[in-house]
Image (cartoon, grey):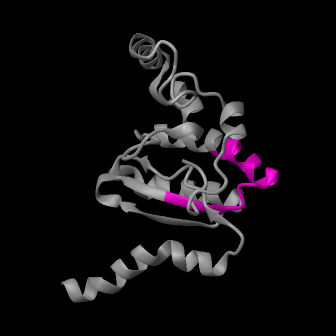
Amino acid sequence: DESSSAPFWQIRRSSLSLLRNKVHDKYASPFIDDMTVQPKHLPEFMPKLRKIILKYKLPATLAGHFGDGNFHVIPLMDIESKAEQAKLEPVMRELIPLVLQYEGTMAGEHNDGMVRGPWLPAVFGDEVFALFKHTKEIFDPHYIFNPHKKTDASWDYSMDHIRTHNQNQLIK
């Protein structure tokens, strides 16, 4: 019934704004925002995801398309802070194996981006990643398009080039 579901849709659409009212001087940092796991695994996966978020003290919103296992976790961070930046790598080191354990991917709906790029060999395996590199070298041998974002991504480069202000979106 549409009228009884309306309040829940309002909460979903307002979740980031509601959290922003409680957490100041931090902004949306969507570096883990596009995970997909098999829906049958959500009851086991979600508590483990929550444990990681709590471990690193990341206030975050959670929304998505749970029917197909795709969801968006958007932590609020002061990404200019070196201490906050230092959380990114350990979060990814814990999260990627967890997502893969439950037959998932880190980019179910959007792109891999600069922060997820260094982890692509772990996500896709060495053989598929080598195919990505070979395709890139055929069509863009000088790495003109999207340099350092997929096949030649490195964690250090990514951390040196994080966008700290982009219409309140911090990491793309």
Residue drawn 48% across the image and 64% down it: 62
Q: Can residue 128 be found in the magenta stretch?
A: no
- Relative placement, left or right, of 55 versus 92 is right
Q: Position of residue 60 (x, y in %)?
A: 58, 65
Residue 43 quadrant = bottom left
Between 163 and 126, the one lying in front of the other is 163
Q: Position of residue 30 (x, y in %)?
A: 55, 54
Q: Quadrant of the N terminus?
A: bottom left
Q: Can residue 77 be found in the magenta stretch?
A: yes
Residue drawn 49% across the image and 43% down it: 99
- Relative placement, left or right, of 134 versus 117 is left
Q: Position of residue 31 (x, y in %)?
A: 57, 49
Between 26 and 34, the one lying in front of the other is 26
- What residue occupies the far left of the structure in this picture? 1
- What residue occupies the far bottom of the structure in this picture? 3
Residue drawn 72% across the image and 32% down it: 156
Q: Position of residue 172 (x, y in %)?
A: 54, 47
Q: Is residue 131 above or below residue 59?
A: above
Between 49 and 89, the one lying in front of the other is 89
Q: Is residue 30 above or below residue 156?
A: below
Residue drawn 28% across the image and 82% down it: 5
Residue 89 quadrant = top right
Residue 57 quadrant = bottom right
Magenta span: 73-91
Q: Is residue 100 above or below residue 40?
A: above
Picture mark count: 0
